[in-house]
Amino acid sequence: YEAKLQKCGYHLFSAGILDTFKRKLELENELRRAIDRQELHIHYQPQICASSCRIEGIEALLRWTHPTLGKVSPGEFIPIAEETGIIMDIGKWVLKEVCAQLSLWQAAKLDVPTIAVNLSARQFMANDLVASVQDIVNGTPCDPRQIVIEITESSSMGDIESVLPVLYQFKSLGFQIAIDDFGKGYSALGYMKKFPIDILKIDKSFIQEITSDAKSAVITKAIIDMAHGMKLKVIAEGVETPEQLETLRTMNCDVIQGYIIDPPLPSDKLESRYLTGECLS
Ligand code: C2E
Ligand code: MG
Ligand code: MG
Ligand code: MG
């Protein structure tokens, strides 16, 4: 790469930028083959009712383990997948995998809560998104009502005119909609009343400061009250400490997700801990 870049006059780049660039290129190339090479898998994180401690939902989170690069975090590879469009194939793979897992759990007569799947803004730009999601789900015994579609506040608000009809189509098919990372973006609250949302997930940057920063606490409480006023379910993500959990309980937050309960788990662990009737720790 260096020779090529220097030819292009990029020799002024610092070594750090060059390394970052090389890493991105490498990840991009490897990511293209990751599905076929079966390097992707999904972890499942429980979402727990704040008052009863029962499992309310599960979030599916993508994992990539490369044979030589090791574990690559979604925070690093999802943006690359989005920029390059690889997210289209990956997104379909994730949904297929989740439906397959859900079908297995149902066939085993387990009481499975809803499963949330993250969709990227880029996926919403494809005009066949709803059709392809419907195709995948219809090809399995799964019911759309068991699936929650998570979109981030920033991606959903970016292009409201095109996203809104897509969300309504998903709703009419029975899917639930969750707004992810709420509070992190710069969106106008006015959009909130237009969106057909079921669940609001408060960004972990607020949760992580609710016991140390009075403003974060006030904002979190206000988001919860506003969401309840709109009949939405509120999930706090990134809950790590007993103090945060207790504070969220006093604020009437509905659902808790975070390391204090469990990190994202392989499917068999999620199953034995949460679906086969064993007690929660
Ligand atoms: P997200 O959807 O907001 O997912 C929550 C992230 O918070 C996950 O990071 C999860 O592991 C992490 N988390 C959970 N509990 C805690 C906690 O108590 N403390 C802290 N510090 N973190 C916690 P992860 O798995 O690294 O995923 C990062 C992001 O990558 C996700 O954020 C989501 O935006 C994206 N992503 C993951 N899987 C997929 C996918 O299948 N498709 C798409 N499009 N994006 C995905
Ligand atoms: Mg999410
Ligand atoms: Mg989030
Ligand atoms: Mg996110």
Image (cartoon, rainbow, N blue to C red):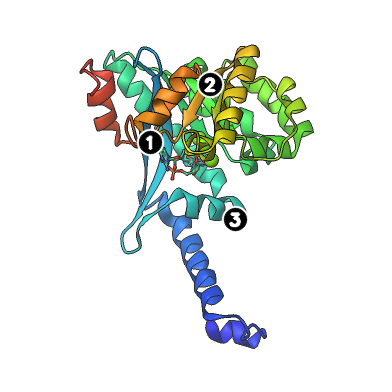
The image quadrant that residue 129 belongs to is top right
Residue occupying image coordinates x 56% and y 52%: 79
Kindly state the secondary structure of the residue where label 1 is placed. Answer: loop
Kind of residue sitting beneath label 1: Glu
Q: Is residue 125 visible?
A: yes
Kindly state the secondary structure of the residue where label 3 is placed. Answer: helix
- On residue 84, which mark appears? 3
Q: Earlier in the sequence, mark 3 or mark 1?
A: 3
Which residue occupies the foreground of this view, 102 or 205?
Answer: 205
Q: Residues within 10 Å of mark 3 (few under 14, many from 20)?
A: few
Residue tagged by mark 2?
A: 234
- Position in image of residue 22 (x %, y %): 50, 72
Kindly state the secondary structure of the residue where label 2 is placed. Answer: strand
Residue tagged by mark 1?
A: 240
Label 3 residue near ligand 1, CB within 8 Å: no
Q: Quadrant of the C terminus?
A: top left
Cα distance in 3D space between marks 3 and 1: 34 Å
Q: Earlier in the sequence, mark 2 or mark 3?
A: 3
Q: Residues within 10 Å of mark 2 (few under 14, many from 20)?
A: many
Residue occupying image coordinates x 59% and y 35%: 215
Cα distance in 3D space between marks 2 and 1: 17 Å
